[in-house]
Amino acid sequence: MNLEFYRGKRVFVTGHTGFKGSWLCRMLVGAGARVTGYSLPAPTEPNLFALSGVEADMTSVIGDIRDFTALKSAFEQAGPEIVLHLAAQPIVRESYRNPRETYETNVMGTVNLLECVRVCGGVKSFLNVTTDKVYHNNEWSWGYRENEPLDGFDPYSNSKSCSELVTHSYKNSFFSSGGTAISTARAGNVIGGGDFAADRIIPDCIRAVQKGAPILVRNPYSTRPYQHVLEPLNAYLMVAQKQYEDTSFAGYYNVGPDECDCVTTGELTGLFCGAWGEGAAWENRAEAGAPHEASFLKLDCSLLKNTFGWKPRWHISDAIEKTCEWTKIWLGGGSVPGVMDRQIKEFMEEAHRG
């Protein structure tokens, strides 16, 4: 994928104030794209969107994806060629606390955005970012492929399964002529500098070491496909570009790390402690009666690799190192936009080396 492709392109990003959205907008703005973001206010304080300094170089619209009238107005103003849908309620445990809001955001939000694409026209490439948790999880040891049944267990995962099905229906019902290429991307867990969310392991690690406290891990034996945030963002931009140029590339793609980077939460936390240093340590604090979360989940990313020649660039140890580097620069009062741009440049140079 060549970021130069995005120079001058009109790109509409939902969820732009979130962790992944902020990194994505930094990439697009750096490439010279004309970016419009539509999202609720940043969900945390501090938040990466403010720290990234990207707002000055894009159009940021604060609005609810569930509000079709407001969304359509922003969409019409932007007149996008490319739409990247990241807006979501993304936390499993929050989805148990607020299932209705989770479904409204993740399902009807997708309907509203696809309705804008249908009614307004002009979009050549649409990508819906979902999750690796869309699959019916049998807790088996091999990776799920794109043709496996979609039936997430918890409200978050299931709402993303529904978002996939909505996308499939719109693609078949309204975009079968090929004028607008429609794809989904099912990504694994991401880590990286600037994630301040609750109930995520690396942010929990950082909050603990800031206090000088041990890191408490509630699911140390759960295996997940972890990757640096720039890995899936690079893949999203690649798919959006390729299907813009040739609609035959539209499809449903898993985006995850190699098998060596599918590690347990305990192993991930240990890697963090080693990279952070300063006496960082963790403790097993498994919760009795905690809400159900999958204990084993991996993706088979052969389709993405075989179709585009894609492969992951940063292994889990690299991802942890980059996250610690970002965090220590931020805590030390250094330039957040500077470290983001440098890490993006390093990643893209590695990706171009093949």
Image: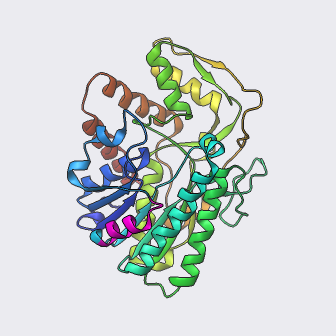
Up the image or down, 39 lies above or below 68; here it is above
Q: Which quadrant of the structure image shows residue 48?
A: top left
Q: Which residues are magenta?
A: 65-76
For the stretch drawn in magenta, the main secondary structure is helix
Say if residue 194 shows up in the picture. yes
Task: Give the quadrant of the N terminus.
Answer: bottom left
In the image, 92 versus 272, the foreground residue is 92
Left or right of 99: which side holds 170?
left
Q: Which quadrant of the structure image shows residue 34?
A: bottom left
Left or right of 238: which side holds 344?
left
Find residue 211 and report its horizontal and vertical position in percent. Answer: 46, 15
Task: Give the quadrant of the C terminus.
Answer: bottom left
Residue at the extreme bottom of the image, as rendered: 177
In the image, 60 versus 191, the foreground residue is 60
Find residue 183 and report its horizontal and vertical position in percent. Answer: 51, 69
Find residue 153 and report its horizontal and vertical position in percent. Answer: 72, 51
Residue at the extreme left of the image, as rendered: 56
Left or right of 324: which side holds 157?
right
Say if residue 260 shows up in the picture. no
Question: What is the image's colouring?
Answer: rainbow
Q: Which quadrant of the structure image shows residue 293?
A: top right
Instruction: Reply yes or no: does residue 69 show up in magenta.
Output: yes
In the image, 190 versus 292, the foreground residue is 292
Up the image or down, 297 lies above or below 13; here it is above
Instruction: Reply yes or no: does residue 292 show up in magenta.
Output: no
Q: Residue at x 47, y 66 (%)?
A: 127
Q: Residue at x 44, y 62 (%)?
A: 67
Find residue 305 and report its horizontal and vertical position in percent. Answer: 54, 60
Q: Residue at x 68, y 31 (%)?
A: 219
